[in-house]
Structures are given as structure tokens and as C-alpha cells.
Amino acid sequence: MQTLDLARWQFAITTVYHFIFVPLTIGLAPLVAGMQTAWVRTGDEKWLRLTRFFGKLLLINFALGVVTGIVQEFQFGMAWSGYSRTVGDIFGAPLAMEALAAFFIESTFLGLWIFGWDRLSKRAHLVCIWLFAFAVNLSAFFIIAANSWMQHPVGAVWNAETGRAEMDDFAQVLTNSTLWGAFPHTVTASFLTAGTFMAGIALYWMVRLGRTGKAEAAEHARRVYRPALRIGVVTMVVAGLGVAWTGDYQGKLMFEQQPAKMAAAEAICGAEGEEAVGLSLLSVGLASGDCENVSTLLAVPGLASFLATGSFTGPDSFLPSVPQVQGEREAQFGAVDEDGEPIAYTPPLAITFWSFRLMIATGLGSVALALVGWWMTRKDRVPARPWVGRLAVIAIFTPFLGAAFGWIFTEVGRQPWVVAPNPTGIDEIRLLTARGVSDLPPGVVLTSMVVLTLVYGVLAMAWGKLMHRYVVEGANTVVRDVSPSADDPGDTPLSFAY
Amino acid sequence: METSALTILWFVLIAVLWSGYLVLEGFDFGVGMLTSILPAGDERHKESERRVLINTIGPVWDGNEVWLLTAGGATFAAFPEWYATLFEGFYLPLLLILLALILRGVAFEYRGKLARASWVKAFDAAITVGSWLPALLWGVAFANLVRGLELTQDGFAYHYTGGFWALLNPFALLGGVTTLVLFALHGTIYVSLKTSGAIRDRAAALSSRLSVAALVVAGAWAVWAQVAYSRNAWTWAAVVVAALALVAVVWAAWTRRAGLAFIGTAVTLVAAVVLIFGAMYPYALAPLAADGVGLHLATASSTHLTLVIMTWVAVLLTPVVLAYTAWTYWVFRRRLSTADLPAPAALSWSAAKSAFATALR
């Protein structure tokens, strides 16, 4: 394999892996902070229990999110130095700001939260988790600002003398329409992930308690786990609506900004480009990567056009087809690269088409959980049917998959560009992925890809083991309030240590 | 070549970030290194002492590491060509450092979370490798920057062409030993500041011996760096400051003044960064041969606008970061000993089962 392919695989593996842990942290941190707030305000011990329980899961998860994030920061220089030197003038700024504005808060205040239970007053300790929750979301903002610039460059000019893109207006980078589509979409999806996680675990535990058939167990389920389930369900409903709404907004942006991604996502191949297009539910023949063998077997008429343009029929609803995009791009940017090889201006059809559908389909797992969880626990009932418990566990995984497919879609759908040209503005800023890769022998990148994958695999097992064990332990252990009082200024032995 | 004032400011700021990183993570690398050599007594007691060591840095190591991420991000933003050329060129050593940091970070969080000997042992190994290896490699990497690199220029892009093995030259290896000894010393002093009881005495005794080794090794490396490679005469000042600080450390360590000794090692590390960056100036990546290709700071720099924006962000946020970081150290100012430790937070299966049974009652 070439360095380019290996570098792309490595980036895909490390990024998708990193993004298993990130969405749960983004969504769960505010939920834990909310539960701790409930404890501080009401003094009800069940909120402290739930805070500790989900707090532990949050920490186990955050640890892997942090360490895999370090690789991301350096990988741009290591494997993508062509990219870094060409756009670093703009792209580096949000990355540096993430470190300075968000990472310092995250790491410092999480440390204070973990070790500060008996060192800080209740209120100061509560402020720590809220600052942490705020900072992880701020992190997401800066990273998506950087990513959105690659999807839709704004606020920059091309300098032919230095051979790079240069910052022109940073305010535009931070007000990029792509950013304001992608950031709320990512955050709502993260809340959907965390809500599903909380509700899934709570429902699993309610079933486990309900199956004992004992009245005390049912009472415990009602008292401790039902509130967690309700919080999870409400989060899922609100976040789910947000995901759908922001997703729709992004679809319309994609039509304007990345027609090639739209054409590939819908596998629009024939002359349909001249008429309203249906949303394909099943297309076949995508694997060859071009339009030769593609045929749409099942489609909802006009729906793709409606989602992209707000119109089912008529001239406003015409979507570009793959061959049409290819033709336009060839006329604009040339048909061949510097080595005389033809450039495919549409992303791989099969991956783009299916990752888009799988993103939506897996995301829907949360809907099933929300409905079942809400229905099975109405009027204080405690479910005891095994399938409910099984559904709860399976549903937990679905938004993680949705998030992974979402990133695969948005990143693969941008190919062959690493910086996609901006058709609504400065199309002289653009960079082919092949031009962004480092000048390294393939063996070097192969080595790092294999080693990172192995290490990540081992760590995933440790993560899974701890998550499983701590979920199964549950929030049953009574926890003490250890916050320092006036006569005890916090000089007692630690209540928590590694 | 004209280097603007803002470019120089950002060169200095990146040096400041590296100073912060080496001073802060320097001691937590040192503490990590100590977990494999300092604990004494039977296995049970060793385990308690290992936990004491890890807990002295528990609340702060992650914040310390952010200095590295910020240094990386700031280099990307302020000097993209430097970031790109350096990390592409140092691909494999950087990968080793990243792997070490990954394993180490996870180990701190995970090692105590499961009460099983093989689990704890595996993560102890991760802490050991994750602390010794970067302590060595950072010195190797920085020494190579001082010494200069074989570069080529291809249009706008610069590339390192020396290969991996060329980085392991005698000067760089001595640089590696220097950071290894300095971090070990810095960590030992930190432990003698943050603990009480037998472990504190052992740490203090070790720090006296290490301080002499550090004076010899670091002194030799600094003089070598200055005489053979520095591109500026004024960096002699940094060499002198480092030497004086280390002499003070030797005195403070032998007379059990841990606070002064800690300030001394911190000053030494800052002086080392001043020497390293000063020796490179005006290059971001200095040439190995006098007539070789070097990446000049002005060439490596971002545009004026980017630097202005970054300067504003740094000016506004840095004091805030420093303030809450200082507060963290204040909150956790108390010394630790084996007597202070609660039972391991690890999940105990029997406790979980009895809690479940209690919930049913």
C-alpha cells in the first residue's frame, strides 16, 4: 500500500476510535453535573449515589478519550505534514485555542473533582464538575470549527507566493455556516448517546431488580433507577429532536457546499440530475465506485430533493448527479493530477451511501429504547421481562455506532479533497488529500498504524472490562457525604485515592 | 531574513510552554520513574508506597500534560512549517513518546480500579515504561534540535532527511541521559516535599545522590551544547544559571531543604529550555552543517494576523490558567503518607454482591 492509503487508514482508525469516548463524555458530563446539583439542592442521598455511579463510568471513559486525543493533535504533523504546512495558518489556531481554553479547564477541574470530595466545599466541588462539563463542550466547538473549515473554507485567502492558505478573517472561521450546522449536530448526538447510556443502564437495572420478584427490590428500582431512566429518556427525546433538526439543516448546507457528497450519498447516477430525486432506500452496484452498475431498487419519490432543497418537484429540486459533478469539477479543476492520473471528484459511492444510511438507522436504536423505557415504567411499574433488559443493553451501543458512521460519512464524503473547495466563495483554496500526506516511506506509517491499532485494541478491552464490571456493580452501595464541614477543614485522611 | 517582533514573541512563548511542560510533567515523570525503584518493604507495604507516590501526582498529572498539547497546538498555529517538518521528521521517536503517554495516562486511572494482581501489575509496567521512556526521549529530541538537522528544501516545503538512527548520536544520547537524571531528581525532590514518613526519608536520601549526578551530567551536556552548537554567545548565561541552580540543588538536597531544591531543579529546567531555544535562534530547525539548509523562524511563521489573534487569546487566557492551576496545588497541598490512604477504590465483587443484597432488603 502507498503511504497515502496507510495514512488515511491510520487517521480513520484513530479518529473513529477516539470518537467512541468523546460523545459519551460530552453528553454525560453535564448529566452527572445535573445530578450532583440535585443532590446539593435537595440533600437526597439517591442523587449522590447516581452521581458517584455515573461519575465513575464517566472517568473510565474520559481516560481513554484524553490519551487518544493526544495522538490526534500530533498526527496532523506526523502523517499529514503537507496539509499542516498548507493550511496551518488557519487550522492551527482553533487547535491551539482548544488546548489553552478548554483542555486546561477539563484536566484541572476534573482532577479537583475526583480528589476534591473531602477537600472542597460542596458548592466549590459542584462548580468543578460544571466547569468540566462546559469545557468538554467547548473543546467540541473548537475541533468542529477546525473540521468545518476543511469542509467549507472561509475567512482565508490563497497566497501563491508562500504556497499556502492564509488567515483573512478569523470571525468568519468561527461563524462558518458549516460549523453552526455541525457543532449542534455533534453535541445533540452526544447528548443522545449519553441519554441512551443512562437510560439503558437504568432500565437494565430495573429489570434486574424487578426479576427478583421482591417488593423491596421493586421499591429500590423505583427510588434510585427510575429517576435515572427518566432523565435519560427526556434527554434522548430532546436531543433526538435536535439531532434530526440539525441533520436536516446540514443536508441543505451539503447541497449548497458539497454537491459531490450529496450525489454520492444518494447514489444519483443517471439523468436524474435533471429532475427531482427520490430518497434511495436501497441501491445496488455501488462497490465499483462509479456509476456504471448502479441502480436504485427502492426510493421514496422526491424526498431527497425535499431534504436538500425544501421542494419535492420543479426546477428548485434538481439535484446534481455523480457524472454531472464529475464533469463540472473536471472543467473547473482539471481532469488529471500532476502525475497524469485521472481524478475522481466523487467520493467512494458504497461507503458514502451506506454510512449515511447506517448513521440514521443506528441512531434510531435510541428511539426504541425511549419508547419502551417510558412505556414499561409508566405509573411506577417495574418491568421484569428479560427482553426489556436485553433491548436496554443493545440500545446503549446504537448511538455510538451512529456517531462513528456519521464521521465516516462526513469525512469520506469530502474525498478526494482534504480541504474541499468552497463553491459559494473562495474556491482557490482547496487541497487534494493526496497532496496533504507526509513525505514518508510506507513502512513507517504501516508500523505506527499496526502498533496504534494493537495498543488501542488492548485498551479497548480494559475499558470494556471496567465499564462492564462497574455497570454490573450498580448504584446500590450507600455513599457517604464526605464534604468538609466547619469543624473539619479537610485534614482527615483522604476519602478517595487512586 | 527579517524576523518580525511577533514572530520572536511566539518563539519565546513556545519556549515558555515547553518550560512549563518540562517543569511540571518533569516531576510527574520523575514520580512515575520512582514507582519502580523507591518503594521498600514487603509486597504489601511496597504497594501502599506505590499508591502514595501515584497519589502525590494524581490530581495534577493530566493538567501538566496539557502544557505539551498547548505547545504542540501553538507551534501548529504560529509556525506551521516548523510543526509539519519537525513532526514528520521525528515520526518514530514521537510515536514512541505518544505510546508511552497513552499507556501511562490510562494506567494512572485504571490501575486501582480492579482488585486483581495481574491487572495492577500490567498497569504498573505501563507507568514504568511510560515514565522512563519519554524522560529519555525528550532529551534526545531536544539535543538534536540544538545540534541541527539535515534538511532539504522542496519548493515551500522542508523535509528532514537524516533518518531515525542519525538521531541517536552521542550528543543527543547524553541529552537524553540529562533529562532522565533531571526528571528523576525533580521527581524525587517533589516526593520528599509531598510525603511524610519513611518514604519521604528515602526520597530525600536519593535526591542528594541524584543531585550530584545531575550536576555532572547536565553540566557536561550544557557546556558541550554551548561550545559545539550554540548559534549565540549570550546563551552562556543560561549555562551559568543552570549550573548555579544545580549547585544550589546539591546544597539544598544534602541539607534537606526540599522546597529550595525544588525551586532549584525548576530553574535548571527553565534555563535548559532557554539554552535550547537560544542555541537554535534564529532558526526553528537549525542546519546540521554550517552551510546546510535551515528552517528560518521567519519562513516557518504564520501570518501577522494569525499571530495577532493568537497573542490576544494567550494574553487573556494564560493568567486565568495559571491562577486555577496554582489553586489546585493549594487545595492538594497536604503531605501524604501510607497512613492517609483509604482502602483501594477498586471494585470488590463481594461488596457489590452484598450491596445488591442490601438493596433488596
Image (cartoon, grey):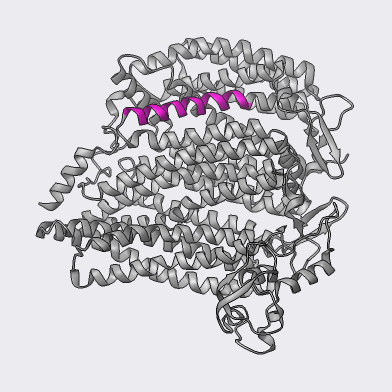
Reply yes or no: does residue B129 show up in magenta: yes
Q: Is residue A117 above or below residue A383?
A: above
Classify residue B312 as left or right of residue A181.
right
Q: Position of residue A455 (x, y in %)?
A: 51, 37
Placement of the N terminus of chain A among the 4 image quadrants: top right
Q: Is residue A264 above or below residue A106?
A: below
The foreground one among A144 and A47 is A144
Q: Residue furthest bottom?
A: A314
Q: Position of residue A259 (x, y in %)?
A: 69, 71
The foreground one among A427 and A104 is A427
Q: Is residue A143 visible?
A: yes
Q: Which residues are magenta?
A: B117-138
Q: Main secondary structure of the magenta part?
A: helix
Classify residue A125 as left or right of residue B234.
left
Q: Residue at x 56, y 25 (%)?
A: B133
Classify residue A265 as left or right of residue A336.
left
The foreground one among A320 and B237 is A320
Q: Residue at x 68, y 81 (%)?
A: A272
Q: Residue at x 69, y 17 (%)?
A: B222
Q: Is residue B275 visible?
A: no
Q: Position of residue A366 (x, y in %)?
A: 39, 66
Figure disc tally:
0
Placement of the C terminus of chain A among the 4 image quadrants: top left
Q: Is residue B17 above or below residue A153?
A: above
| Res A183 → quadrant | bottom right
Reply yes or no: does residue B113 show up in magenta: no
Q: Position of residue B181 (x, y in %)?
A: 56, 17
